[in-house]
Image (cartoon, rainbow, N blue to C red):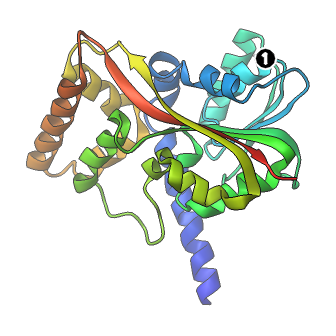
Amino acid sequence: MTETADAREADRALKAKHRTMWALGDYPAVARQVVAALGPALVEACAVKAGDRVLDVAAGSGNASIPAALAGGDVVASDLTPELLAVGRKEAEERGAVLSWQEADAEALPFDAGTFDVVMSCVGVMFAPHHQTAADELVRVCRPGGTIGLLSWTPEGFIGQMFATMKPYAPPPPPGAQPPPLWGREEHVRELLGDRVTDVEARRQSIRVDMFSEPEDFREFFKAAYGPTITVYRSIADDPERTAALDAALADLAGGALRDGAMEWEYLLLTARRNG
């Protein structure tokens, strides 16, 4: 095989692993029970209005797509994992939201340039392994004058710290893959988007999470429902000592964040306008 063919095969294998990871557990439960407020916050920041053509990249089960459709947008929810889209379709029907669902790789979106008025992603595109490639696609499919809106966990916030806690127990990332929480740094996103955008507005905010009264409640929920956490635990399943150490580390992290039965999880909310 040529070097280019090898790279393509490696990328296909990596995307297959990502697709499988996000199908593990019950991410829709995380989106619905824990972080439901994030989607509406992003839709509001993007000022989605009736008639806007909206693309939600790495949409999962529609945390932002469904609110955007309910706001009047003509929405396409795209994601690498069809199992999540299937859950989203059902939830949209239950909520009376009409939108399209399409399986798609955030690093190779199957849409023409300049197709959408709003291109957004809610803690989604940040998990694409090649940040510049994904950012280039966000810009490409947004029309001149359109809005790009991104909501991403910060490295310093609770979820960023959770990934840092799990890192020593996880298999090493493939060459070229970048850490997801980098999207939570304003300077990183500005560099990715470059001079192709203007009117950048970025602010750090937090979501209050009050469904975990004890640190162990958080840990066990994420061990059962959250694909990245499940994947890490599977990688050390034959090592009881490391499993116990990760159990303790995640409980310690949650214990340090709990205040009166609630946690504040920080994220970066960034919007920008595509240059004409």
Please tell me which residue lies in front, 134 or 16.
134
Relative horizontal placement of residue 236, taking residue 208 as reference (left or right): left
Q: Residue at x 46, y 61 (%)?
A: 178
How many labels were placed on the picture? 1
Looking at the picture, does residue 169 appear above or below residue 228? below
Looking at the picture, does residue 98 appear above or below residue 78? above
Specify the farthest residue to the bottom.
Answer: 2
Q: Residue at x 32, y 25 (%)?
A: 221
Q: Where does residue 88 sit, x and y in percent of width and height?
A: 66, 26
Specify the farthest residue to the front.
Answer: 199
Q: Residue at x 54, y 18 (%)?
A: 37
Please tell me which residue lies in front, 4 or 163.
163
Residue 251 visible: yes
* Quadrant of residue 46 within the rendered picture: top right
Q: In what quadrant of the picture does the N terminus appear?
A: bottom right
Q: Residues within 10 Å of mark 1 (few under 14, many from 20)?
A: some
Three-letter code for the amino acid on which mark 1 is drawn: Ala
Q: Secondary structure at mark 1?
A: loop
Specify the farthest residue to the left.
Answer: 241
Q: Where does residue 155 sit, x and y in percent of width and height?
A: 38, 45
Residue position marked by numbered label 1 in the rendering: 71
Q: Where does residue 115 sit, x and y in percent of width and height?
A: 89, 46
* Quadrant of residue 206 within the rendered picture: top left
Looking at the picture, does residue 103 appear above or below residue 211? below
Please tell me which residue lies in front, 241 or 163.
163
Q: Residue at x 25, y 20 (%)?
A: 217
Residue 108 visible: no
Looking at the picture, does residue 35 appear above or below residue 152? above
